[in-house]
Image (cartoon, helix red, strand yellow):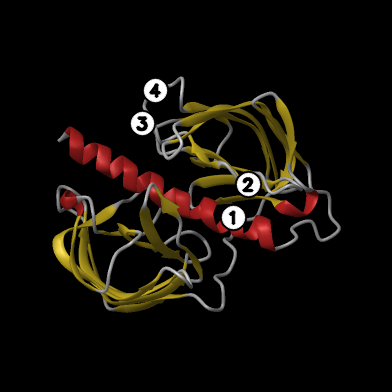
Amino acid sequence: MKMRTRLIQLLAALSILFVASCSKELSRETPTNSGKPTGDFRAKIDGVDWVAADDSKSATILSGVINVTGTSADGKSISITILGDATGSYTVDANSTGIAEYDDSDGSFSTNQSTDPAKAGGTVVITEIDEANKTISGTFVFNGYDPNTGTTKVITEGIFQKLPYSTTLPPASITDTLTAKIDGVDFKATSIAAPIISGNLFVQGAASDGTHFVGIYMPQGVQPGSYTLDFYGATYIGQYSPDAGTVLVSQGNGTLTIIENNSTTRRIKGTFNFTASDISNTKTAQITEGYFSVGY
């Protein structure tokens, strides 16, 4: 039972990570200020000042998830994603659904990749959500760990002040597609991401408001062929979340078929179908005729 609970926590974290992944793309590729006030977003990384560039910082509050993302002029980024939509203190560590991450040329340093608090973990405090002006403010500190290099980055004095937020996810790239039928109803993801974490690829899609999240989890190097989608096998998993608070998974009753996984062009194509249900099988959803073609 403990292992089942931990896997559910992991999948819940990965579904909110989708919001972070989409926001990173928005932050890096699309100017977000449009001549309007952009707020402040800064921290110290191992004691060195880091400041998000005005045209490379963004925030979203949608479907019960808060995300704040920014990239400095030299390409170093911080992303914070928490399950919540109110002021207060939130823990980000391996035992929570919240995630904070720092990325630079040395690697990706996140709060959920070690259970040792000296290596990974921290706190985010949301101090204000100004609904009239649609801005968010808060503070944060965390240690981020990269298991590939075995190193930790220490992030201190983090602050985001009067940062404008949106209530929709950015649109998917015109080259990416994720479609399916959910209980017989056609679904086409309007936001799509395919993050890689610790050698695993997560193809994810959702509606622009963050609902109807569909995710397929597999090894990054998966080869063409057919695979059983089994939550308990923890290698190939199908997930459906109608909202941020609900996690339904495949339990050995679905199939993923990889058509192509081109490591040179970094594009993967496949089909999928599965019955998604909670652990007690009290809630179910049929995911059929699934198809994706996504860059990663």
Task: Measure how far apart labels 1 and 4 are at the Cα level.
Answer: 28 Å
Check contact, mark 3 vs mark 4: CB within 8 A.
no
Check disc 1 and report its element: helix, strand or loop.
helix
In this rendering, which labeled residue sits more in front, label 1 or label 4? Answer: 4
Check contact, mark 3 vs mark 2: CB within 8 A.
no
Q: Nearer the viewer, residue 125 or 264?
A: 264
Check contact, mark 1 vs mark 2: CB within 8 A.
yes
Q: Which mark is residue 23?
A: 1
Task: Measure how far apart labels 3 and 4 are at the Cα level.
Answer: 11 Å
Q: Earlier in the sequence, mark 3 or mark 2?
A: 2
Q: Give residue 205's position: percent from left, percent from top.
A: 43, 65
- Quick one: label 3, few (<14), some, or many (20+) residues within 10 Å? some
Q: Give residue 132's position: percent from left, percent from top.
A: 73, 47
Q: Give residue 265's position: percent from left, percent from top.
A: 48, 73
Q: Which residue is mark 4?
A: 116
Q: Residue furthest right?
A: 35
Q: Nearer the viewer, residue 257 or 242?
A: 257
Q: Earlier in the sequence, mark 1 or mark 3?
A: 1
Q: Which residue is mark 2?
A: 69
In this rendering, which labeled residue sits more in front, label 2 or label 4? Answer: 4
Q: Give residue 287's quadrant in the image.
A: bottom left
Q: Which residue is mark 3?
A: 95
In this rendering, which labeled residue sits more in front, label 3 or label 4? Answer: 4
